[in-house]
Image (tube, rainbow, N blue to C red):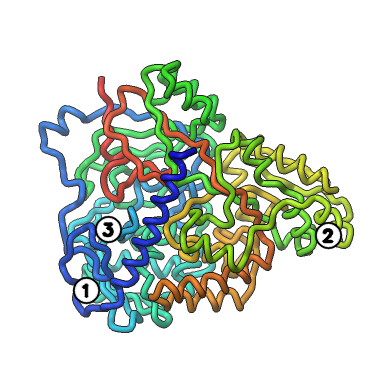
Amino acid sequence: MKRHAIRFRVLTVITAGLALLLAATACGADEPTPTPLATPTSAGPAPTSAPGAPQPPELWDERKGGTLMFGTSKAVDSPHPFTTTVSVDNYIKQAWLEPLLQLDGGELHPVLATSWVANDDFTTWTFHLRQGVKFHNGQEMTSADVVWTVNYIKEPENAARGHGALGPTVVSIEAVDRYTVRFNMAGSQPAFPLTISEINQLPIVPADSLEPGEILVSTGTPGTGPFMFEEWVPSSKTVVTRFDDYWGGKPYVDKIVFLLISSATGRGNALRTGELDITERLGPTFANRVLSGEIRGLTVDAPALSGYRRILFNTTSPIFSDRNVRLAAVYGMDMQKLLDEAFFGLGALVNLSVPPGSVWDEALKECCPRRVADPDRARELLAASSYGGEPIRLIIQRGREGVGESISRQLREVGFTIDMQVMESAIYGERQISGDFDLTPEGGSFDGDPVLDGHSRWRCEEGDRRISNKSGICNPELDALIDSYFGLVDLDERVEQFKKIYKLFDDEVSVKHMGWNFNRFFGWNANVKGFEHRGEGSYTTKPVGGGLWRVWLEE
């Protein structure tokens, strides 16, 4: 457990790094100032070559070729670039989609933008684009593509996950020239670059890639990443192939097959037999067998910045529309028991996905102490509520039955009737988005700022398909507090505003925080070389370089 405590201290450092970044934005220069890559700044680094510059031809010739078989715990729900970019779905899509910039280690790095700068009051942000970048369809990326992408995401009918970040904050976007775009903001937005630093908010695709309102797709749109989309088989696999014209230098492997194997035991066995070259989310028992030397020829490593889990209530369902029923369920669930039963006790109880000891954790202790299990209180609340014994639809992704069984047992003990439904990841994701559930677990990670992490899940979300806010809460007062949060620069002011925001959110009782669990391990065979990861669970960027882009297979 000591190792995991160290990891949490790393998270605290990341939070401090973000505070420095926000302080740096206060200068608001009119033109980008060249700065070293490692220095957080509103202007961003000066235009540079790709962090992972093309390898010498002789090195590439030695390493090229082969198909990498990658075992995943979940399938891609849809190859759509905007609607399903969460967790494993997001990590796989990082192979072919890229953002303008990337947050890594608490610092912003250039990707498709080479520099970015705000005006004096942070009401406009200007981004200078990397020139010569090609989409997988052969056309060059220009400002027209960025403008189209942003406008598409801003339209509620398109059900884009990034709508929660861009809709309320961006009034308009304009093309200044072929390689420059300007965002006109809704008030002062000093933290805006942070909000678009992942593909789950703003992946850049060619203009007119999708029709308005087009949700159901079977192929991926062209991106700019190191691999091209080739094939998607629902609830089975996603295949990508090498893009030789990648701006950062072509990858080594010819192809990657992301193969769904829901069971951690199944993924471990497939790794041992050679069916897989690499896999994610192996359990601690298997990992310990590798680390002890019982299983040879494999390497395991834990992405210790991932693994946060919560349990969501569908507040729009007939059962959980009653706050007292939700509150009864919260007091009826003992999260330490759940960690012990489903995750071998490897974890830490938290309130929200913030690291213990951070400024955010201290703020939560002041405003919103974690509700601990109290079965007697749960029974009292349930007796006084509108609940009449109706079965609660608890949907669980296949392979996570242990979580569902623990939740079911605990809730039955306080008087609930539970209908646990186990399903494949694609169906599970669709049921969450469409609101076809009463109760469901969900994962996440911490990227440095709890409001930046959570605001899209806390805001009102229009339409029948809730891409981000799956619990369905809608409080205009909460939305207004979140909007004003993005206009704050001073860390102390942001912390105080966070306490107000989270107090309102917590009062809605839409979620039960499970905590962090440490049961996820990458594993790979000895023939896999060059694999790196950022520690939060993804496996394709760092922010540009490392990951699967620079993996090769040794004969």
Lateral position of residue 458 relative to residue 548, left or right: right
Q: Locate residue 471, reporting x and y percent.
A: 64, 59
Q: Locate residue 199, reporting x and y percent.
A: 39, 56
Q: Locate residue 230, reporting x and y percent.
A: 37, 40
Query: Marks 3 and 2, how far apart in space?
Result: 49 Å
Q: Locate residue 144, reporting x and y percent.
A: 29, 68
Q: Which residue is mark 3?
A: 109
Q: Is residue 500 above or below residue 446?
A: below
Residue type, label 3: His
Q: Which residue is mark 2?
A: 381
Task: Name the residue: 68% across, 41% down.
Answer: 337
Q: Is residue 381 above or below residue 53?
A: below
Q: Nearer the viewer, residue 31 or 222?
A: 31
Residue type, label 2: Leu
Residue type, label 1: Asp
Lateral position of residue 410 relative to residue 435, left or right: right
Query: Marks 2 and 1, how far apart in space?
Result: 61 Å
Secondary structure, mark 2, is helix
Q: Which mark is residue 305?
A: none
Lateral position of residue 419 relative to residue 436, left or right: right
Residue 218 appears in the picture as rendered: no
Q: Which residue is mark 1?
A: 177
Say which label, 1 or 3, has the lower sequence index.
Answer: 3
Q: How many marks?
A: 3
